[in-house]
Each structure stands twice: as C-alpha cells, then as structure tokens.
Image (cartoon, grey):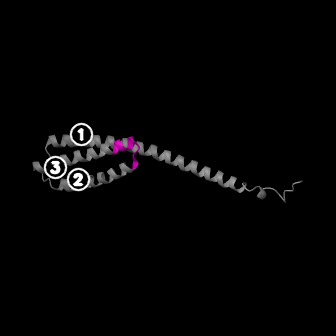
Amino acid sequence: MMDACSSLLAHYQYILALSENMLSMARQSEWDALVYIEEKYVQAVSKISELNAGIEQTLPALIQDNITTLLRQLLDNENEVNQLLQARMRQLKELISQSARQQTLNSAYHKFSDLASILPGEIKTTG
C-alpha cells in the first residue's frame, strides 16, 4: 500500500515538473518545445487513473494533502500557460490579418504596375 501511495505521489511530482517546464517554455515563447513537453504531460496525466487503480484503500491524510498542494500548483501553472497561449493566439491573428492586408495591397498595386494597362491607347512620343 505504501509503495503504491509513494508511486502515486512521485507521479504527481513528475507531472508538476512537466507543468513547470511547459510554463517556462510558454514564458520564453518556445512554442515547439511547449508542444513537445505537453505530449509527455498528457501521457503522464493519463497514467494517474492506472496508478489510482492500484491503491485499494483511502490514501493517508499526509499523501492527500501533498497531492492537493500539487494539484493547486498544477492548476495555477495551467491557468498561466493558457493566458500566455491566448496572448500568442492574438499575436498570430494580428500577423495573419496584416499579411492578408499586405497581400490585398500587393495584388491591387500589381494590377497597375504595367503602365500600358492603365493608359488608354498608345503613348506617342515626339522625337
């Protein structure tokens, strides 16, 4: 029983370490690294139910308190990561919008880049 409890607590600590790494990557705008760590995080979280199944009795109060503290930290980290991701999404939307406006302008000016296409008839020069 105690081995299973220790294993569960250690796994929550591992999840918290992954969460802290994700937060660090988000703060540094290292989005590819964040996604890579997030994959490990999701796998680690999915293993919790498997570890819980190996525990037949109620967890001791000390273990419950430790897990509760870890869960609070995980939620705080997740909230901050979500805020940083929302800010990044706003930046990307703005970049996409700017790109679309630039493309529209380029297309409009491209139509007029050939002088012959905007002047009626031939241009006659005296010489």
- Magenta stretch, overall SS: helix
Residue at image mark 3: 7
Whole-percent x, y for residue 54 in the image: 15, 55
Specify whether 124 is left or right of 98. right
Q: Which mark is residue 69?
A: 1
Distance in Å between CA atoms under marks 2 and 1: 16 Å
Residue drawn at the location 28% of the way across and 55% of the way down: 43
* Observer able to see residue 94: yes
From which residue to which does the magenta span run?
Answer: 22-31
Secondary structure of the residue carrying numbered label 2? helix
Q: Secondary structure at mark 3?
A: helix
Mark 1 element type = helix
Q: Are marks 2 and 1 in contact (CB under 8 Å)?
A: no
Give the vertical position of 31 relative to 114 (above or below). above
Q: Is residue 19 magenta?
A: no
- Residue of label 2: 48
The quadrant in which residue 51 appears is bottom left
Horizontally, residue 103 falls left or right of residue 69, namely: right
Q: Nearer the viewer, residue 38 or 12?
A: 38
As for residue 28 lying within the magenta part, the answer is: yes
How far apart marks 3 and 2 lie (CA) works out to 10 Å
Of the residues under marks 3 and 1, which one precedes in the sequence?
A: 3
Amino acid identity at mark 3: Ser
Tell me the residue at 72%/54% (across/down).
Answer: 113
